[in-house]
């Protein structure tokens, strides 16, 4: 009888100890339901969201997957022909992989042509420099599509039938895209620009062919009409649509 009593007591003590251990291990206020929320370390990561790129010149919404980096500009000291590069808060490169959206809210036009010239906004973009082998020139076919508000997006494509001595085209028979820019009525390549005055707005879209190891790089430009191209052009257009220019 005594042994049975001792056994019951020991069993009760064991149950109490195990129950206390379970209670201590369980976070207060959490009701187990078999979901990952019961285990903080198993909760899915909070999805990345859009961020705001902002300085005293502009404000823009940068969606997940894109990276905004302040651009630089060359400065020449005295008679030196070697530039020093300094930060340019009026301009930003927004990239996603090899895709490049460039925005400059204080773009200076060099030519006297109203609206500027193609080379003034395109020269230096890797995919343009890949196609246009001699500057200043314009290559391929330009197609205008509705962008947003009163802005139009002009897309440039090229294929073998448009190849010339100064315009390099793909040799694989494909039609490829290599450049786009935004323009509004009454403006050319420079928006908001009054001849002889600043500032002007330039928005361009290009592809970083300089990062491609394949040759010729022009063969690996985005194919015209492809789902990837249409998606990325739409994303870049949407980013540009979010632009707020300050102080004007």
Image (spheres, helix red, strand yellow):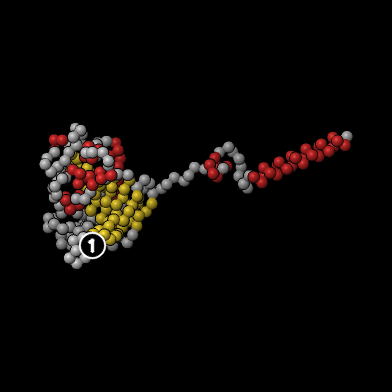
Picture quarter containing residue 73?
A: bottom left
In the rendered view of the protein, which quadrant contains the N terminus?
top right
Give coordinates of residue 201: x percent, y percent.
23, 55
Left or right side of 232 for 166: left
Farthest top residue?
A: 173
Residue 151 makes an appearance in the image: no
Residue 111 makes an appearance in the image: yes
Frontmost residue, 93 versus 30? 93
Count neighbours of disc 1 (C-alpha within 10 A) and say few if under 14, some if 14 to 19, many if 20 or more: few
Left or right side of 18 for 205: left
Left or right side of 157 for 234: right
Report the residue at 77% width, 41% height from top. Answer: 13
Give coordinates of residue 169: x percent, y percent.
17, 38
Give coordinates of residue 42: x percent, y percent.
53, 42
Q: What element carries label 1?
A: strand
Report the residue at 27% width, 51% height from top. Answer: 102
What residue would you read off at disc 1?
Answer: 75
Report the residue at 33% width, 45% height from top. Answer: 96
Frontmost residue, 82 versus 156? 82
Picture quarter containing residue 212?
A: top left
């Amino acid at each position: 009888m005594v042994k049975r009593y001792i056994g019951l007591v020991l069993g009760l003590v064991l149950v109490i100890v195990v129950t206390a251990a379970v209670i201590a291990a369980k976070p207060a206020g959490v009701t187990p339901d078999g979901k990952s929320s019961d285990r903080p370390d198993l909760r899915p990561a909070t999805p990345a969201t859009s961020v705001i790129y902002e300085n005293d010149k502009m404000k823009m919404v940068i969606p997940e997957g894109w990276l905004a980096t302040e651009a630089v500009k060359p400065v020449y000291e005295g008679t030196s022909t070697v530039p020093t590069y300094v930060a340019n808060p009026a301009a930003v490169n927004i990239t996603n992989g090899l895709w490049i959206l460039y925005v400059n809210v204080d773009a200076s036009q060099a030519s006297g042509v109203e609206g500027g010239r193609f080379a003034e906004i395109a020269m230096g973009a890797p995919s343009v420099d890949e196609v246009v082998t001699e500057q200043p020139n314009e290559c391929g076919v330009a197609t205008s599509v509705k962008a947003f508000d009163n802005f139009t997006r002009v897309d440039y494509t090229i294929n073998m039938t448009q190849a010339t001595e100064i315009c390099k085209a793909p040799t694989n028979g494909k039609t490829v895209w290599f450049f786009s820019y935004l323009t509004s009525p009454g403006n050319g390549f420079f928006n908001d620009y009054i001849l002889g005055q600043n500032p002007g707005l330039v928005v361009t879209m290009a592809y970083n062919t300089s990062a491609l190891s394949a040759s010729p790089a022009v063969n690996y430009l985005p194919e015209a009409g492809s789902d990837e191209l249409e998606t990325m052009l739409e994303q870049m257009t949407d980013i540009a649509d979010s632009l707020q220019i300050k102080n004007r």
